[in-house]
Image (cartoon, rainbow, N blue to C red):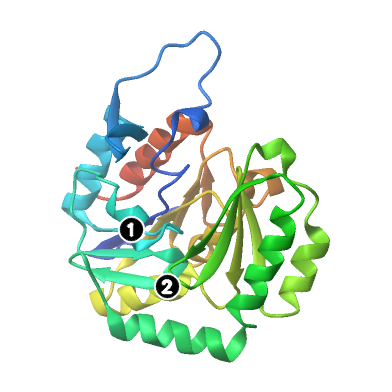
């Protein structure tokens, strides 16, 4: 697809398993050596997430010529641990629940989001009760509430996550969606979306071309609305076979897929 020729671009990128990877999600071919890595997150002083050195270079180049916007389901505190080597003016956390401007939360946006959720979704307390019932089955290692906006569960292992289609249908009737990303199961209000927050950033930035990258069903809305969209050859979207006219799919999966999608964006945008 030939992108339109706007004078400026906004590049919205999911983080985990799109730009950055834990070692368990590298998906490197057996016997292949690790590429040069950059540590992008530490937890208790220990390296927790990485990108390749080439990916870090491309992130810096994109940030220099476009408005780079990290867009993540991570909470504000979890996002604060990430260091991409750049300081984007805008960032979206908690699946669109918080819009950070120069590192500070926009309280007006947060209030608008909460009002929208209250009007369109059942109470968080009921969803917490659903999560507790699921955890009682023994496959859940931890349950968390994200910034008092949604709930997620972390399984001991991906293979242990049961068939949750019936649970998803019950949640949908109450205005919530269920999304499985690796070992994590997200229970999120349907109106809490990355694309809504991204539309607010676009409104503030002005006339721009929009490029987006992501791997999960929670990224589908922002990918659909982009002029140029890229997803890696892994994750929830890949497993479901999702595609679109504006979409490019990497050949590689895992860590190298993350590098490749940045190469694709760099080839599409005027990054020099």
User: Which percent across, then down, holds residue 66?
Assistant: 23, 57
Secondary structure found at label 1: helix
Asked whether the beta carbons under mark 2 and mark 1 sit within 8 Å of each other, the answer is no
- Is 5 situated above or below 141? below
Q: What is the CA distance from the residue labelled 2 to the residue labelled 1?
A: 13 Å
Q: Hey, which quadrant is residue 172 in on the image?
A: bottom right
Q: Which numbered disc covers residue 250?
A: none
Q: From the image, tell me which residue sits under label 1.
A: 77
User: Which percent across, then down, holds residue 63?
Assistant: 21, 51
Q: Of tags 2 and 1, which is closer to the observer?
A: 1
User: Camera-side residue: 267 or 167?
Assistant: 167
In the displayed orientation, state which residue is furthest to the top. Answer: 31
Using the rendered image of the protein, determine whether residue 225 is visible from the camera's viewpoint: yes
Q: Hey, which quadrant is residue 196 in on the image?
A: bottom left
- Is 27 situated above or below 203? above
Secondary structure found at label 2: loop
Residue sitting at 55 percent across and 12 percent down?
30
User: Camera-side residue: 177 or 145?
Assistant: 145
Residue sitting at 33 percent across and 42 percent down?
267
Q: Earlier in the sequence, mark 2 or mark 1?
A: 1
Rate crowding at label 2 as few (under 14), some (14 to 19) or many (20 or more) other CA atoms within 10 Å: many
User: Camera-side residue: 269 or 174?
Assistant: 174
Residue sitting at 73 percent across and 46 percent down?
138
The quadrant in which the C terminus is found is: top left
Q: From the image, tell me which residue sits under label 2.
A: 97
User: Camera-side residue: 68 or 224?
Assistant: 68
User: Which percent across, then down, holds residue 126?
Assistant: 67, 76
- Is 201 situated above or below 41? below
């Amino acid at each position: 697809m030939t992108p339109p020729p706007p004078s400026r671009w906004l590049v919205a990128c999911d983080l985990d398993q799109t730009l950055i990877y834990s070692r368990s999600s590298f998906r490197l071919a057996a016997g292949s050596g690790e590429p040069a890595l950059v540590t992008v997150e530490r937890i208790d002083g220990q390296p927790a997430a990485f990108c390749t050195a080439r990916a870090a270079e491309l992130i810096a180049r994109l940030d220099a010529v476009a408005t780079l916007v990290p867009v993540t389901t991570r909470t504000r505190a979890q996002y604060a641990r990430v260091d991409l080597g750049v300081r984007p003016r805008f960032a979206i956390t908690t699946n669109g629940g918080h819009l950070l401007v120069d590192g500070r939360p926009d309280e007006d946006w947060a209030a608008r989001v909460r009002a929208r959720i209250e009007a369109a979704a059942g109470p968080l307390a009921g969803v917490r009760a659903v999560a507790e019932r699921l955890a009682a089955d023994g496959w859940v290692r931890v349950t968390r509430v994200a910034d008092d906006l949604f709930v997620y569960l972390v399984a001991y292992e991906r293979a242990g996550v049961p068939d949750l289609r019936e649970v998803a249908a019950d949640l949908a009737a109450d205005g919530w969606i269920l999304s499985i990303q690796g070992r994590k199961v997200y229970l999120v209000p349907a109106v809490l979306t990355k694309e809504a927050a991204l539309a607010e950033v676009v409104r503030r930035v002005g006339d721009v071309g929009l490029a987006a990258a992501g791997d999960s069903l929670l990224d589908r809305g922002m990918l659909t609305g982009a002029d140029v969209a890229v997803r890696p050859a892994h994750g929830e979207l890949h497993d479901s076979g999702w595609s679109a006219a504006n979409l490019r799919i990497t050949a590689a999966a895992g860590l190298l897929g993350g590098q490749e999608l940045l190469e694709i964006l760099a080839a599409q945008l005027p990054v020099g």
